Amino acid sequence: MSTYDDAYLKDILQRTKVVAVVGVSMNPVRPSYYVARYLGLKGFRVIPVNPGHAGKELFGETVRAGLGDISEPVDMVDIFRRSEAVPPIVDEAIEVFPKLRTIWMQIGVQHAEAAARAQARGIDVIQNRCPKIEYQRLFGELRMGGFATGIISSKL
């Protein structure tokens, strides 16, 4: 399912405080970097997860090798990995975060069976969407053209 009610998405974004971003890049031009950075700037605590960069610092947090290296509670796991990599990530998230509320798969990322396993545990699942785009759209940061201009004008 890739169509979601706006109220449902807005509720998820409003209740979420801590996001583990799996597959985050240290490269500022990569979408996973700027989405994670944006979420951090909006007040979310972002815990970066990438085994290739474990131990480094990103957005004031230590990059973790895997979800199992996170000892604090996480509200949402945001997945920036190929669809075929999703099942073990979802299984680990279910195992290590008993109070996990949301699994969010980025644009182009979907896995019906993994989503069904999470939903069977009462976890909300969003597939093929970006929390940055949805946040901007639902909280009034996007203009008609789909981007934030930073210019106040009545000529839209």
Image (cartoon, rainbow, N blue to C red):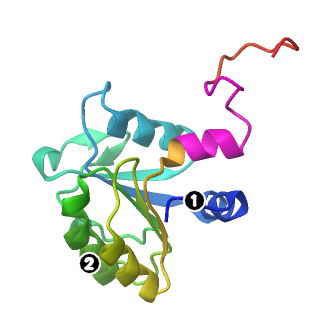
Q: Compute the Cα span from label 2 to label 1.
A: 24 Å
Q: Is residue 52 left or right of residue 79?
A: left
The quadrant in which residue 143 appears is top right
Residue 134 in magenta? yes
Q: Is residue 14 left or right of residue 154?
A: left
Q: Residues within 10 Å of mark 1 (few under 14, many from 20)?
A: few
The disc label shown at residue 91, or none:
2
- Which part of the image, by quadrant, shows the C terminus? top right
Q: Which residues are magenta?
A: 133-147
Secondary structure found at label 2: helix
Q: Is the magenta region chiefly helix, strand or loop?
A: loop
Q: Is residue 149 left or right of residue 84?
A: right
Identity of the residue drawn at 50% across and 37% down: 38
Q: Is residue 2 above or below residue 88?
A: above
Residue on which disc 1 sits: 3
| Amino acid at dot 1 | Thr
Q: Position of residue 146 (x, y in %)?
A: 62, 28
